[in-house]
Image: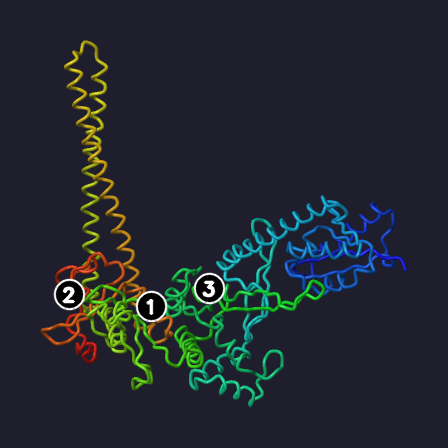
Amino acid sequence: MEKKFAIYVRKSKLTEKGNSIQVQIDKCRAHILTAFDVQSTDENTDIFMDEGLSGFYADRKEFVRLINSIDNYKCLLCYKVDRVCRNTGDMMALIEHLNNHKVTFISCSDNITNITKESTLILELLSVISEFERNIIAERISDNLHELAKEGRWLGGNTPLGFVSQKDNVTIRGKKSTKNHLEPVESELQVVKTIFRMYLDTKSMNAVRDYLNDNGILTRNGKQHTRTSVKTILRNPVYCIADKDSLAYFSEFCETIYAEEHEFDGQHGLMVYNKTEQLKKKKENSTFLEPKFTQIITSKPISDWIIAVGVHNGIISGFDWIRVQKLLQQNVDKYDRPKQASKSVLSGLVKCPVCGERMNVKTLSNRYTKSGDLRFNYRCRKRMEDRFGCTSKDINGNELDQFIIDAICHMNCPDDRYYAQLQNLREELLNAQRDEQKEIKGLEKELDKVKAGIAVQMENLRESGLTAEDKQLIWDDIHALQEKRNDLTDRIAVLNEQIKDEEYSLEQIEQVKASIATFPRLMEIATYEQTIELIKKIVSFIVVKHNDTTGDDDVHIVLCGAEDSVNFNLARERSVMCHSGIDSIFNTPCGICCKAYSLVTLKG
């Protein structure tokens, strides 16, 4: 039986429109006629077609069928190398496979074959270029995602329960195009509201699942609900209303928000992109003839999400949606976190009052608070490594953590000493900037005069009839003016650097103020990990010193942006970290047992 021709065609995107596939087939058939003087027909040519699949992975149904039936063919044709493979390793394996079965490979667009060593080398080069182009395309898709996110578009895929995709015809720069948005399905949205309400009441996904199934409420696919289907709905930000609470939440934890503050109007819903990363990992038993991959979908951290405000209306308040996320995370923590792990929120922030080293967490085995949390202390790192390495005493970690949280919550009060003195520090920096800018203006005027003086003296040197003594006097004056110019220039440069430093501190202070303003509200809904992140945005470091007068432990909180103004002593020795004096915004108004914060005295 005479062997046939094989044509492989591929299109990476599955669409109803477009003739890319047919164009590839026609080009390959035409090449058969030109190169072999044979008319390509259905009897002597088989077509292998993959549509909607990436060329980077070899587990394409038609591609696998082709390589496993290669003995039936004398020649494999494709329109371009990148249609067959966008992976160099797979391309080289394919060429080796074809060579072993004495099958000719032809890329029709550039007439490249596997007949000679030189052409094989070119094929390898083309496959490397194809793989590089694939990576470039991936980067373009990522960039395009950011642009589309600014418009709050629905980018396709399975729509969430409660919505359908609505296509709109638009004209962009004179070209007709389409864009999609979400349209509500009221009957399904009532189910979504029920799921959120029940979960907030019961705090149990099993209870929500059982209620839905017992009442005959099925998924969109007509199946019974599972914990996974319930969890998918609860985690989806598309239902969250774009309001002040959701803005504060995502502003703290997410780096990219394509929406202005006024767009969080308490009506529209959120569109969130870049939530997951999808990868295909080759299995250990994968072979070229039988490629096997595992689809891995990983959730990206909230900091990587892209937030926008959609066209659709939200149905769950920002506060309730975030409460649900906290409850979901607590359930994860209950099962995933090691039983003996502490819930310290200040790890890495507490510094030893004796030596200035970081204090680490030291858990107390089988000792728990009334709320069931493991008890722990903060212990100097040097002392943890060597019990004689430092003389500092341990600090009660559970009480210090709660004290710091309560203290920050109170900082936003108008009469709070921290917040008031933070305002004073801001005013001091602004006043310093004004004085420095005023000094710079005066120095610049003086510098202009010095430059003019140098120019005049240089002109005087050009006059005729000057004696050697006159010239020397003029040169001496020029040198003196140049030294003065250099001094003025250096001073202006120093002042500009100081202004830059102050601008950085002012920016940090504004960020700290904004974080302090939202801290009490966010603390009601923040997860354990988010609590740590919130505190680190406000606090640079903490030092706890024993007060011999009161017998209590004074807590010194150093806010971000104010590190250079720290003003107190270490317990036993001086350090670049701390200086003399204690009356500053970094010192609590009194000991840690201060009644304003309703805390007991910390014991060493």
| Three-letter code for the amino acid on which mark 1 is drawn | Leu
The mark lying in front, picked from 2 and 3, is 2
**Rendered location of residue 545, percent (x, y):** 17, 70
Secondary structure found at label 2: loop
**Rendered location of residue 295, percent (x, y):** 60, 68
Secondary structure found at label 1: helix
> Can residue 431 be seen by looking at this rendering?
yes
Q: Name which of mark 2 and mark 3 comes first in the sequence.
A: 3
* Image-quadrant location for residue 453: top left
Please give the label number shown on residue 534. Answer: 1
| Three-letter code for the amino acid on which mark 2 is drawn | Arg
**Rendered location of residue 421, percent (x, y):** 18, 62
* Residue under label 3: 305
* Residue under label 2: 572
Classify 10 Å Cα crowding around label 3: few (below 14), some (14-19), many (20 and above).
Answer: some
Answer above or below: position of 525 versus 143.
below
Answer above or below: position of 135 versus 366.
above
